[in-house]
Image (cartoon, helix red, strand yellow):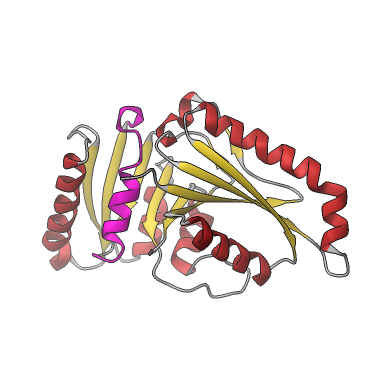
Amino acid sequence: MSDPTLLTPVVFPEPELYLMDDMHLSGLRGFKLVLSGYWEVPDGLSPDAVRENHETDAEADLYEIAAQFSRAGARTDIQLQFGATGAAEREYQSRLAAETGADGVLLAEELQSVHNILVPLRDSRHQAEIVDLVSGFDADSLFILELYHVTPDDAAVDAATDMLRDVEDTLLDRGFSEADLEVTVEVAEDPNAALAATARDHHMVVLGETEQPEVSNQLFGPVCTYIAEESGTPIIVVREL
């Protein structure tokens, strides 16, 4: 299996992707990262004029971020676009994800470590894609990879546990050890709130997206957006290829 590709949006003129150090990013060495810089051009200004004034500095920022991933062992590439805000940016990121064959989109304002990963699974949707992407993490760099399901119904616990155990078996076959993996099924009245609370205790969340954005300036649907906003934890949204 080839290395999974992650598209990583970096929004200018004030990019907010703060990295820690090479050692803590080593879990991503099995990935290719495409840093997708997008400079939001205000209404009334020419994208070409803004590009002429800021392209060099923006590319330098992207290369500086890329160098940290590269030193940690990940392959990197950069892309830079100047355009309107809102829907235009979302459409560009979606188009670039398709063009690059990205397996997932990494949404992060601050990426401090990649040692403790939460993998919520609602059902079988995106399960194969999620397993393939998760298999790209460097098992030697992980403390724990938690397979997680939350349900409001006690009667669904056994079926959810069986589902997660099947995924666990697949990951064991992919080179993870029993010490790397943890299975958790939680019962909660508000599954999204429970998921956001659990996400706060992890360095990264990997989940599939099945819902469309509610507003034009959102790249993903309401569940992903809610988890990102409430937890502040970096999220990889797995694409359906």
Instruction: State the residue in front, 184 or 175.
Output: 175
Instruction: State the residue in front, 223 or 108.
Output: 108
The spot of residue 197 in percent (x, y) is 40, 51
Q: Is residue 181 left or right of residue 106?
A: left
If the image is split into quadrants, where does the C terminus sit? bottom left
If the image is split into quadrants, where does the N terminus sit? top left
Q: Is residue 118 above or below residue 124?
A: above
The spot of residue 186 in percent (x, y) is 24, 55
Q: Is residue 4 above or below residue 41?
A: above
- Residue 130 lies in magenta, yes or no? yes
Q: Is residue 151 above or below residue 138?
A: below
Q: Which residue is painted at 47% across and 28% down in the image?
A: 24
How many marks the image carries: the answer is: 0
The spot of residue 30 in percent (x, y) is 39, 37
Q: Which residue is painted at 63% across and 68% down in the image?
A: 217
**Residue numbers of the magenta segment:** 124-142
Q: Is residue 100 above or below residue 66?
A: below
Q: Which residue is painted at 71% across and 39% down in the image?
A: 61
Q: Is residue 154 left or right of residue 113?
A: left
Q: Which residue is painted at 43% across and 46% down in the image?
A: 200
The spot of residue 177 in percent (x, y) is 19, 33
- Residue 21 lies in magenta, yes or no? no
Q: Is residue 30 left or right of residue 186?
A: right
